[in-house]
Image (spheres, helix red, strand yellow):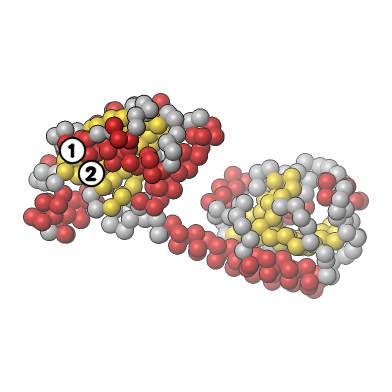
Amino acid sequence: MTVDPDPQNEAERLAFLRSCEILDTGQEPAFDHVSRLAARVAQCPVALVGLVDAERVWFKSRHGIARAEVPRAGFFCAQAILAPGEVMVVPDAARDARFAGHALVAEEPGLRFYAGIPLAVPGGGALGTLCVLDHHPRDASPALAEALRDLAGTAMTALDLHLARKQMREAARIDPLTGLVNRAALLEAVTQAIAVQRRYGTSFSLIKFDLDGFKAFNDRFGHEVADEALREVARLLRATLRSSDLLARLGSDKFAALLGGGGEVDLAKVAERMRAAVEAGMAGRGWLLTASLGAAQFDTPPADVGEALAIMDGLTRGAQLAGRNRVMRWDAMPVPLRDVP
């Protein structure tokens, strides 16, 4: 078994593949239809829509084989993606030094014949292949090669539909007024942070804040000015955070930020920077708006996202009761919720 060379644009190709968020996803009828039809047209027992990841080939759709993925090294698809637009044919893998040592050739199910065409995207190289395989040596007719080309186009249409659904899901996670992610997206991110913390022992931090007196501001200046103020607050807050931090609008005048880095983050400094940015930015526009913030570093995981947000709500209420325009901290001590201000 030889070592497979990488495509020239391997880093870009892998980045695009992963941005599609298709690896390790569930079955999709459009892809399964393509693999079944390919098997029928080729009269082959096995057909795959295989995506070539860094160390593996993962099968988005598989017909006639149980395995969901195989090692990339020495597998047919790793060679096929080197020539986008061309059908690669291997009449007898057992007699081909590139593939003879691969487990699916040397062991069960003993694959011998392969014909595959890369699934190429404009400027992104080939993400994988549509291929058919047989347990017996054989040749590929010109008609089979042409059919694979046509079916590859259908597979790429299925990928386009997958990406369109992904874009729709992402759009549903964005607050249309500020361009920040919304409450649902933050809840999902905090849930994931808790799961990662339980598995790896990492910590995370949350900062939540409410604008002080926003209802009166809205009543005085009207919705258009109030909306402009919220957009400005979002801009100010973005400027205080790292690109890796997640800033969300929870609704109305409430915002929150999820910070990674655990103890490496100076939470007090970050929260104070956010408070000061809002105060100065609003004053610069002639608007007497400030913010009350709650800041918590979770060194041990909360029971769930609901408990985490309950703690944050308690902290922002505490900041408001203490006089507003300030930060109320919680240092991840085992304090019962009833004792949180």
- Mark 2 crowdedness (10 Å alpha carbons): few <14, some 14-19, many ≥20: many
Q: Are marks 2 and 1 in contact (CB under 8 Å)?
A: yes
Q: Callout 1: few (<14), some (14-19), or many (20+) C-alpha neighbours within 10 Å?
A: many
| Residue under pointer 1 | 320
**Which residue sits at x=37%, y=39%?**
308
Label ID, residue 210: 2
> Foreground mark, 2 or 1?
1
Instruction: Identify the element where label 2 is drawn.
Output: strand
Is residue 19 found left or right of 281 in the rendered image? right
For the C terminus, the image quarter is top left
Q: Give the distance between the C-alpha atoms of the residues marked 2 and 1, in whole angstroms.
A: 9 Å
Give the quarter of the image for residue 326: top left
The three-letter code of the residue at mark 1 reads Gln
Which label belongs to residue 276?
none
Task: From the top left corner, tell me how far across and down residue 272 is, in percent.
Answer: 24, 31
Looking at the rendered structure, the secondary structure element under dot 1 is: helix
Percent coordinates x, y for residue 264 in the rendering = 41, 26
Place residue 62 in its image quadrant. bottom right
